[in-house]
Amino acid sequence: MRVSAAALCVISFFSSQAFASTDKFIYQDLGKPNICGQSSATVWDVNGGELIVDGVPEVYQGAYVKEKNVTRDVSTIAILNGENPEVVNQLRMVANPACGTEPTFERINLLAQYYRQQSTNIDPSLVPAEISPPDLPLPPVIEKDQFETKVQFQARVNLAMAERDKLIASAQQKYRSDVTARNNLLEELTRRQSHLVGAATDNPIYFYGQAFQAVMGKPVFTPKSYDAERQVMFFDFKAETADYKHSVAVNVPQQQAKAVFNAAELYEPQLHYEMEGDSLKLTAVSLKVGEETFKGSQTDESFQAESISVALVDDKKIDTDGIQLKLQNPNLVDKFQLKAVMQQSETELGDELLTQLSSVDAIAEDKTKWLFNIAIEKYDNTDDVIYSRRSGEAVSLAANKLLGVPQRHIYALYDEQATSGAIKDKLKLMLSHVKPQDTVYFYYNGHGIPALPDNDPYILPHDKIPDFIKDDSYFRLNNIYQLLSKSNAKSVVAFVDSCFSGATDGVSVIKGVAASRLVPKKVGIDDTKMAVLTAGRNKEYSNMYADKGHRLFSYYLVQEWLNGTRQLTELHNVVSGKVQARSFEMGDLKQQHPEMYGNPNITL
């Protein structure tokens, strides 16, 4: 998909439009047909003071008919589609809330609210279709030849997979480019809609004036009498299509009076209305006859500034949910390698940690201890994190049996349980129970995202898209740590099996960008009451420990708990050494150096 500069210019132009900020309007004959009737259907255009109708609101079913092959002067639809047709489809109004049987000013109020709502709607034709993800190449089927060694066979497999990865990377780059262009357009449409909603909220009288005109039809003046002494002509005024009438007085010089009195067919009256609070007042009258304009006499006893009670419903919510401007995930997800590893783990691997934990006796529960555990293996919108849930479950069991955290004090969210809403609600709930003498353990095992442009580290809930995580600052790692630090807890220890470089197991989480691993921004904590142990540093990523069926950092963390290590400095030194040694064996690019910062004197 390619979005032209012209398309964005058109949207930008419409975004800049605003309704005139005023509390006044003029009621006059606009030379348009009566909208109450199918024979005189009319198109509403927002730039002309009325409204293009782009859809049929549910509350006004049957109010419109679709009319094809109608020429539109400026077709934003055509420009956005890269075309320039002379005709486009339009919806024309053939019925209207203004044409109901309710009292006149009730209909005006109803129609004003309707116009206000419609003015904020986005033309559905401007919303581009979702970009379809490409079909990824199938994994190669490679059989080992009896005359080749395992090393030779693995080299062939690696070469074939590398070729497949190149094809996927090329497809990902194009897919990201197309999706990003679409998302940029949707964001511009969203900004336009927000602008229109603000304008509609700030200027309700604009819509009331349009509704007043639509319900009333044109104003009709009928001459009644002339006072030659005072040079004032009296008229009966009535609205063409509504029950609204009264008398007005207009200053007309004596020498012109007779001609004016007898020229009713030339009358072009204007009635000026002004809002004062919730009242509408007729404040001035003028009458154009040919080339002459005569002003109303506001001092005459026959002319009173009429006050009409109106309901502009300023506080009524404008519904902007008619069109879903949902941004699209620009990342392609390749599950092939993940499935292969998981199949291996299920058929060949036992769970060594689970076996060891099951065989140890649990220590006494300590009601001053709490654990908040987030372990996300399966993601909706990006690659999975292999063995994450398995390690998370091991941490919960170990915290209960080895650290004494009561089962009731363990708040664990795994996979689809760990949505953005659930994390917020459950963490708030748990911290509300924490007392000043308590200890809080926080464990996170999932993707870490360095949000551009500052590489601020974020945790990634199950239901979030990596590219858009920065839209919800709650999940900024610094904010999570601040919530923990500012709680009632005496001490807080965070174990984070994620490196926030934007890559996990050597695979970039944000696909199709130039840098696969980024240096995350440093995060500050209250180092008097909090300590953090992380899986790695800088541009490193966290690894799985395929031979054990766990995440590498989490495996050695629980092992040291089983070994009885409770002092943080010692725990970090031992775990870090083992993780470094094992990751070195995995390859130079997989080296992992766990770090610790904060208060080293906290004891588990």
Image: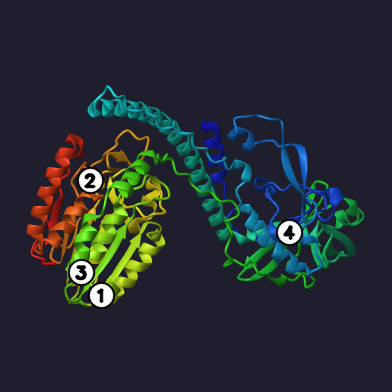
Disc 1 crowd, CA 10 A, few/some/many (<14, 14-19, 20+): many
Amino acid type, label 2: Asp
Q: Which residue is mark 4?
A: 60
Q: Which residue is mark 2?
A: 547
Q: CA distance from mark 2 to mark 3?
A: 25 Å
Q: Residue furthest right?
A: 262
Residue at image coords 73%, 42%? 90
Label 1 sits on a secondary structure element that is: loop
Chain-order first, disc 2 or disc 3:
3
Label 2 sits on a secondary structure element that is: loop
Disc 3 crowd, CA 10 A, few/some/many (<14, 14-19, 20+): many
Amino acid type, label 3: Lys
Residue at image coords 43%, 40%? 330
Q: CA distance from mark 4 to mark 3?
A: 63 Å
Asked if the residue under mark 3 is in contact with the one under mark 1, i.e. CB atoms within 8 Å, the reply is: no
Say if residue 479 shows up in the picture. no
Of labels 1 and 3, the one closer to you? 3
Chain-order first, disc 2 or disc 1:
1
In the image, residue 405 sits, relative to residue 572, either above or below, namely below
Which residue occupies the foreground of this view, 235 or 560? 560
Residue at image coords 19%, 65%? 359
Asked if the residue under mark 3 is in contact with the one under mark 4, i.e. CB atoms within 8 Å, the reply is: no
Quadrant containing the C terminus in the rendered view: bottom left
Amino acid type, label 1: Val
